[in-house]
Amino acid sequence: MKVNRKYKDSLFRSIFNNRPAILELYNAIEGTNYKDESIIEINTLKDVLFKTIENDLSFEVNNKMLILIEHQSTISKNMAVRFLAYITGIYLRKLGKKLYQEPLEKLSRPEFIVLYNGEAPFPEEKIYRLSDGFKEIDEKTGNTGLISLDLVLRVININKGYNLGLIRKSKTLRGYTTLVTKVNEYAKTKPLEEAIKLAVEYCLKRGMLTNYLKENVQEAIKMLAYEYNVKDAIKFARQEGRQEGKAEGIEKGRKKGLEEGKKEGMDYVLKLMAQGLSNEEIKKKIKDRDFQD
């Protein structure tokens, strides 16, 4: 199946980037019961300044709280740094020239959330901090006192069987997690395109994501195909990089396989995706490529 570059937008963002779905999701996560959709202000990053840093969903609730939500199928240890970039971009955009003025400009209090539905085992919820990645300071030569900068990030597992209370409260999130779960199930025995179409049919028959899928079914199928092709191809590239590294010895191989192979492989995969190649075509090109060039 060919994938079109214009479908690189995530299905999660496409489904939830509207006030009704956001309010429903917010109420489910926070345990609130707001009804008025007008309290939601969407401010997802799409700035020219931050064109390489775009998160899934960002919004303010009643001018009091700024929520940044991202959906992930893999856990990155650099998530907190990425969210730091998101919030910096949004605050800079909001302040504008006021950044240099004397009066203190009040900012909405931020909250950072990742919704996880990957295949790797993960607890119901886990907290990550920006400070987890700080280098340790030598007590004899450095200051080990107050940490001047930190960021707290909640990662919530939305896989089948986890956080059932949250899933029940959001019909849209329940439909989304069911769709992804069924794609994963069908893809074990069927081609990806067929697996996606069967998953979409499964949801429609059960009244899940009905309004969204009826209006956007072809776009949803293509977005899912793109996401799964990218994930599969990058995983394959990482494996190829590690194999190349092993051939050069334990230490040298570890460095090349996990660092150079991963970086060059991922860069190469993204270039191939931009050309609209299928997953199988990408795998063949990766296998034929010599990353030592």
Image: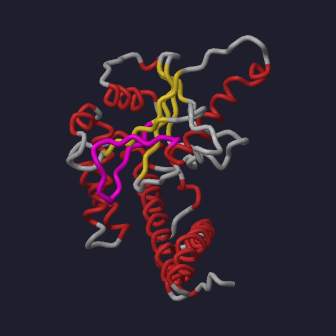
The answer to which image quadrant residue 276 occupies is bottom right
At x 48% / y 61%, what residue is drawn? 226
Task: Judge left or right: residue 156 versus residue 222.
Answer: left
Q: Say how the picture is coloured.
A: secondary structure
Question: In the displayed image of the protein, which residue is found farthest to the top?
Answer: 103
Q: Is residue 124 shown in magenta? A: yes
Residue nearest the viewer, comparing 114 with 173: 114
At x 26% / y 38%, what residue is drawn? 167
Measured as percent of width and height from the top left, residue 23 is found at: 39, 26
Quadrant for the C terminus, please.
bottom right
Measured as percent of width and height from the top left, residue 237 is found at: 51, 74
Q: Is residue 55 above or below residue 42?
A: below
Measured as percent of width and height from the top left, residue 7 is found at: 53, 55
Q: Is residue 22 above or below residue 80?
A: above
Specify whether residue 202 is in view. Answer: yes
At x 31% / y 52%, what residue is drawn? 122
Q: Is residue 173 shown in magenta? A: no
Residue nearest the viewer, comparing 19 with 97: 97
Q: Is residue 52 above or below residue 130?
A: below
Q: Is residue 236 above or below residue 108?
A: below
Task: Judge left or right: residue 197 versus residue 87.
Answer: left
Specify whether residue 281 is in view. Answer: no
Q: Which residues are magenta?
A: 113-131
